[in-house]
Amino acid sequence: MKGLRAALLGTAFAVAATAAAQAQSGPTLRVGMAAQDVGRLDPHFAVSTIDRVVVAWMFSGLVRFKPGSIDPSEIEPDLAERWETSADGRTWTFHLRRGVQFHGGFGELTAEDVVFSLRKSGTAASSAFAADFRAFQTVEAVDSHTVRIVLRENVPSLLGILTNYSGGFIVSRRAVEQRGADFVRAPIGTGPFALDRVTPNQSAELVAHAQYFRGTPQLGRVSYRFIPSDASRDLAFQNRELDVNYGRADQTWINRTRQVPNTVVDVFEPGELAILNLNTRQPPFNDIRVRQALAHAVNRAELVRFRGQDVAREGQSVVPRGYLGFAQQPLLPPDTNRARQLLAEAGHPNGLTVRVIHTQLPEMLTMMQVIQQQLRRSGITLDLQVVEHATFHQQIRQDLSPLVYYSAARFPVADIYLTQFWHGRSRVQTPTAVTNFSHCDQADAQIDAARVSTNVEEQKRLWAEAQQILVQNVCGVPLIETLLVFARRDNVDYGYQLRGSMSLGPVITEQTRIR
């Protein structure tokens, strides 16, 4: 491990030598994050909030959400300056901007980089988002600055897959091939900021990309600092050691932080839907009565009161509210007596204990501890094994926890959420794994049929039917949807109004400045 760490650091320092030459004389933006360390900075493996926030500053997509928005109607050109599609919606042609430069002297972006990136994103071995690209038949370079995508079937939103988010990020082919496994800590993109270095358990330092195609950033550097303790991070912000602070999505924190002089608290979309994913293939949750008991033991209204009305709302399905295709479901109500009765019927008259792997990320840990108390009232004891956040992601994907608390937001179309979390192909520990921790596959037919339908009303009906099936089988227990919270000094101007961000944090652009 020491040798690997040394290799990664050596690569990072090599990046630093190149990137430092690009650094501008502008100010440094200091961002505090609730993290022990960064995870994987290859954007196609950036699944945690910690990683998603920072890769959005380094990479671009063919298209992008308008900064500050998650409205699909506001998707606009990014690396592609224009595109057209065939009448049947299955052939898309993208025309790239000319002169776009990669970080670190890796040269001009070409169609070959885009083809390589999208093929990489669509391959399970090199991407956590391969399932999103299942409908891609071919991706080819027509010429040096034109890319053609042919779909084997229609998808609900192709542009949504190609945005500056998840698998849509474009990487340098040459950098990936040269750096191999080290690319996760030495990434090369085309975004407004380039990675300078990563100091483990301390920070990731970024420098302005002077050749950024939208213009040289007004900031010279961004210091992304890892401060897992809420108290330490808040104190650093109050002492003006941070300009931007990852916030706690609870009312007490928001009210207190709003009282800090010269501070703005941004509360923004998307709402991350938290779900207790129950492994239906393993004891004790292979018995639907146990799953139903757990569902009855959860009190969503109590969770919203705990988190705060400004930032939380009750989950109403296994798909978040506001998504195209969302359909509210009749969830099992809180009922302690019924929960105990079901446990007894399932052979657990004295209750049961479940060993659960969970993250130390403060916001998620606090909420899980509240749920732990709720379940205890019904005789269900959660034995929490708390691990570092990156380790949590690794272990739950190894199917090591029969119950997984997972909070996530995705592109706001039901297809993507249903496919990633509830389709049989996405079951963890399979070749096509994504984030199906429940191993449910009962709604696969509805999910697949909705994806290829060209009739919007038919799609909605099928998505609603899929949600009904999943809820009735108690594949997961929806909890609450929590909005995102960051605090900033009032002299920090992002360059846009922060109403939403698919990267789960403020997007730092070339227009971001410190007044």
Image: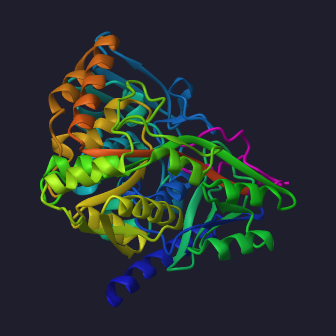
The residue at the point 32 percent across, 42 percent down is 118
Rendered view: 362 above or below 494: below
Rendered view: 319 above or below 421: above
* Depth order, front residue of 420/131: 420
The quadrant the C terminus occupies is bottom right
Image-based side of 254 in relation to 106, left or right: right
Rendered view: 286 above or below 414: below
Q: Position of residue 380 (x, y in %)?
A: 30, 63
The quadrant the N terminus occupies is bottom left
* Most common secondary structure along the magenta stretch: loop
* Depth order, front residue of 368/147: 368
Q: Position of residue 392 (x, y in %)?
A: 35, 68
Image-based side of 275 in relation to 53, left or right: left
**Would residue 182 be seen by someone viewing this image from the given angle?**
no
Q: Is residue 506 magenta?
A: yes
The residue at the point 50 percent across, 38 percent down is 79
Q: Which range is magenta?
A: 488-515
Q: Position of residue 285 (x, y in %)?
A: 18, 55
